Image (cartoon, grey):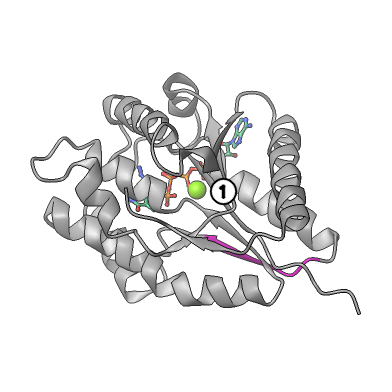
Amino acid sequence: MPSIPRGKFIVLEGLDRSGKSTQTALLTTRLRAQNHTVTHLRFPDRTTPTGTLISAYLTGANQLSDHAIHLLFAANRWEKAAEIEELIARGEWVVADRYYYSGVVYSAAKGVEGLGVEWCRQVEVGLPRPDVVVVLDAGEDVVEGRGGFGEERYEEKGLQGRVREGFRMLGGRGEGEDLVWVDAKGGVEEVEIRVWEVVEGAARKINESGRGLRRVGAW
Ligand code: Z5A
Ligand code: MG
């Protein structure tokens, strides 16, 4: 009897309003139409106890130190780590809207002493490592003009520019080969096709190589 290929762990990243939620929803729909079982995660997951604190911080309803909020974002991912591994082992797909890459680049973009990239990334080591990370590249000027920008903490152009540089930097360091930039300008359907090409190619390679799910390694 042919064995079932393991599931795939796909992450979409990018600046605020670059279209991550739109595109993760479309990808989930497309995969389900192909009879895959898909869990659509979102980080931060605002429904858990850590997510409630994070949401209050982002909307300005509470204040936390920069180190404390960084660790809460990481804890919010660790809460899901075992579930992700179980789903993938069962042959199911996991599509995540943001992951630890946002965790590292947003915190480091604040420029706070003692909150550098290495420190920020250390608490993410050991998490399930995505099979591919699609980085939606829309540019600060484009995202600023999209609905809702500026309502939450971090949504200002200067920080967005540093976040963009942060994603580039991650692409040039250990495990940077996981990140694939996709042009997120243009219509929703156009972008969806570009995302699908990357995801389909990554899934094919995994099935051909038989590679298992890995964990995030130390730098
Ligand atoms: N953060 C962090 O600091 N540390 C962490 O570890 C994590 C996150 C995980 C909240 O994240 C904040 O948390 C975020 C990073 C930080 N910083 N900020 N600010 P979030 O994911 O909950 O929220 P968000 O990313 O700020 O925004 P968003 O609304 O989720 O953006 P999006 O998902 O990328 O975009 P969208 O909702 O799909 O689309 C935005 C709008 O553009 C909407 O009106 C769409 O209809 C429209 N849209 C989408 N695609 C297109 C195209 N192709 N053309 C035109 N219009 C489009
Ligand atoms: Mg979103």
- Spot the residue most to the left: 113
> Residue 186 lies in what quarter of the image?
top right
Instruction: Tell whether 160 sits left or right of 22.
Output: left
Visible in this render: residue 108? yes
Give the image location of residue 157, x and y in percent.
32, 25
Q: Residue at x 31, y 67 (%)?
A: 75
- Residue indicated by mark 1: 21
- Spot the residue most to the right: 1
Give the image location of residue 64, x and y in percent.
14, 58
Q: Residue at x 10, y 45 (%)?
A: 114
State the extent of the magenta-drawn residues as a range: 36-41
> Residue 33 lies in what quarter of the image?
bottom right
Which of the pair 52/148 is nearer the observer?
52
Q: Main secondary structure of the magenta part?
A: strand
Which of the pair 184/114 is nearer the observer?
114
Give the image location of residue 166, x and y in percent.
34, 33
Q: Would you place residue 122 above or below residue 154 in this image?
A: below
Task: Determine if the magenta segment contains residue 179.
Answer: no
Q: Would you place residue 155 above or below residue 28 in this image?
A: above
**Dot 1 crowding, Cα within 10 Å, few <14, some 14–19, many 20+:** some
Q: Residue at x 18, y 41 (%)?
A: 116
Any atom of ligand 2 within 8 Å of the CB at mark 1? yes
Under mark 1, the amino acid is: Ser
Which image quarter holds the N terminus?
bottom right
Visible in this render: residue 61? no
Give the image location of residue 79, x and y in percent.
39, 74
